[in-house]
Amino acid sequence: MSVDPRMTDPVSTDAPRTPATGRRIGGIPVTIGGVGAVVFSLAALFVVWRFGGGSVRFEIRETRDPSVAFDWGFVWAYTPDFLRALWVLIQATVGGFALAIVIGLVLALLRRAPVKLLSMPTAFFIEFVRSTPLLVQLFFLFFGLPRIGWIPESLRVWSSLATLIIALGFHYGAYCSEAYRAGIDSVPKGQWEAATALNLGTLATWAQVVLPQAIPNVLPALGNFLIASFKDAPLGASINVTCVLFFADTTASRTFASVELYTMLGLGFLAVSLPAAFLLRRLERRIGYERT
């Protein structure tokens, strides 16, 4: 007598796949990854708020040796100033991207809203932000927005570092929203139907079925956006954020040591970007993105 395997298999392929968890809040499973993402975002914003500045003094006044092609002594002398500028850049990147991953998810959900009054303006905003350069957005937020008198001052006048973080957050939030949308669309239709058949509510469907399957698929794209935002953050020098590009430009204009300074700039980017890329690959493998 043959037995239908569907009668013995407790998990059907059409059943919603949910992450294993030992704790629920309001019926929604709380996973280690989800808690870690929230903690990371809050901690990143707190660090930038508590220790951020955007205005670093560069006090070293060394000159390069004109008798050598590349003055390593000059490089070592300016390393402390360079590290302070690099720390400002890291603050802006981490704070901006922590904002971007939250804004991106909100935009992705609003774009899928069945109400056109929400979805259409959201789609327009995403396309507008993605179609305009980050530098133009920085100039508008820093120079243009404060001149709009009917907006409360607390919402239109920010420090240089805060302006850079907000610009990075909205700019890369628009890109992250498209990555989230692709991840949500990759969830099989049967998962949605199974959630409906199990009478799961909208919140439970998104929290227990859709997002746990969609977000791991978009981690590689989010990692690329993180590194891209780190490389775009030096544009903050245009609004007087004392990051590495500001340091290199102002120091080069005084010492005429362009080769040494821009070499330091490139090495600094490599020193941060390569370990970040390695850690992102480890994270992808840890959550099981690279399935075999």
Image: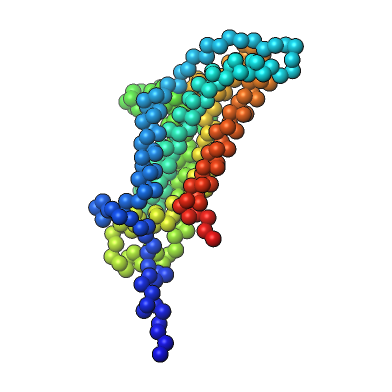
Q: Is residue 9 shown above or below 177?
A: below
Q: Residue at x 49, y 14 (%)?
A: 57
Q: Is residue 256 left or right of residue 185?
A: right
Tell me the quadrant of the picture where the N terminus can be found: bottom left
Image location of residue 61, percent across then percent down: 58, 9
Tell me the quadrant of the picture where the C terminus can be found: bottom right
Task: Note whether residue 283 is visible.
Answer: yes
Image location of residue 230, percent across then percent down: 53, 34
Image location of residue 286, percent across then percent down: 47, 51
Task: Note whether residue 170 is visible.
Answer: no
Q: Residue furthest left?
A: 26
Q: Nearer the viewer, residue 6 or 243?
A: 6
Q: Is residue 98 shown above or below 31?
A: above
Image location of residue 215, percent across then percent down: 44, 51
Q: Nearer the viewer, residue 161 or 124?
A: 161
The answer to which image quadrant residue 51 occupies is top left
Snapshot colouring = rainbow
Q: Is residue 61 shown above or below 219?
A: above
Q: Nearer the viewer, residue 105 or 52?
A: 52
Count the marks: how many? 0
Q: Residue at x 36, y 31 (%)?
A: 46
Q: Residue at x 39, y 54 (%)?
A: 211
Q: Residue at x 42, y 37 (%)?
A: 98
